[in-house]
Amino acid sequence: MDVLVGTCGFPTARPRYYSLFRVVELQETFYDIPTPERMGGFRREAPGDFRFTVKVFQGLTHTSDSPTWRRIKRAELKGDLKNYGLLRPTRENLELWDEFAKSVKPLNPSFYVFQTPPSMRITEENIKDVIEFFRTIGANESFGWEPRGYSYGKPELLRKIFEEVGIIHIVDPFKRNPLIDRNTAYLRLHGIGRGEVNYSYKYTDDDLARLRDIVNNLNSSIVYVMFNNVHMLDDALRFKKLMG
């Protein structure tokens, strides 16, 4: 098993980060469409075997009433704004995916993280849309989806999507187990507490020991363990040391 420990975003200077870890999940790619030049710059400055994963642009996952849409500056969202987000196979979403994929191509991402809002519900009707969206963009095991909140109202419908499309079910392992096993596992740690996230949480030694047991019991040969909390640099370093 190859366990890749890293953080969501750079919590320290990039040259130092590259010396400490083998992977990072870029967050800026969620807030706006990046330039190919910037993505190429990241690739050139990092060691050759360093892995970049990207959090996919919010225009594909979140609707236009999301407060984070205010941070969009570069992306040109054409057509009907109501047709963006929620992994729907609309013309607007599919064209936006093509634009996003081209923009991050110079980075050569090893993994794409789709995170939908907690308000997204899974129904008999929209599972067909989600399946069609992922199939149309050619999703495979380098694509992962992190559903949240109301999406788990009908887990049997959610499982059907992962079974039919072949993508990775991204989870916070302290809250949920993956609905389906794959060769790759992708874990995002948002802190322990009530609700979906508790970013201020600092993981204890007992927490990290429990996380080690969770990772060792996964039926995957590649496991990404990505910390996404205020103390992520220290927590990730401690966990990396614990894993040896």
Image (cartoon, rainbow, N blue to C red):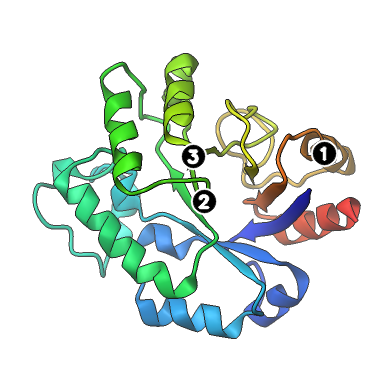
Report the residue at 89% width, 52% height from top: 242
Report if residue 72 is visible in the image.
no
Between label 3 and label 1, give the one nearer the viewer. 3
Q: Amino acid at mark 2?
A: Ser
Is residue 146 at all visible to an observer of this figure? Answer: yes
Image quadrant occupied by the C terminus:
bottom right
Residue 89 position by quadrant: top left
Foreground pick, 176 / 100: 100
**Sequence-earlier tag: 2 or 1:** 2
Q: On the image, which quarter does residue 128 sit in? A: top left
Task: Read off the residue under disc 3.
Answer: 167
Snapshot quadrant of residue 51: bottom right
Write down the residue under mark 1: 216
Q: Which mark is residue 237?
A: none
Disc 2 secondary structure class: loop
Counting from the top left corner in percent of width and height, residue 117 is at: 40, 37
Where residue 179 sits in the image (x, y, percent)? 58, 25
Q: Mark 2 or 1, which is nearer the eye?
A: 2
Q: Are marks 3 and 2 in contact (CB under 8 Å)?
A: no
Residue under label 2? 142
What SS does tag 3 mark?
A: loop
Q: Residue at x 37, y 29 (%)?
A: 119
Q: Amino acid at mark 1?
A: Asn
Whole-number angstrom distance, CA of label 3 to CA of label 1: 21 Å
**Residue at the left extreme, as displayed:** 79
> What's the distance in space between the residues labelled 2 and 1, CA to CA?
21 Å
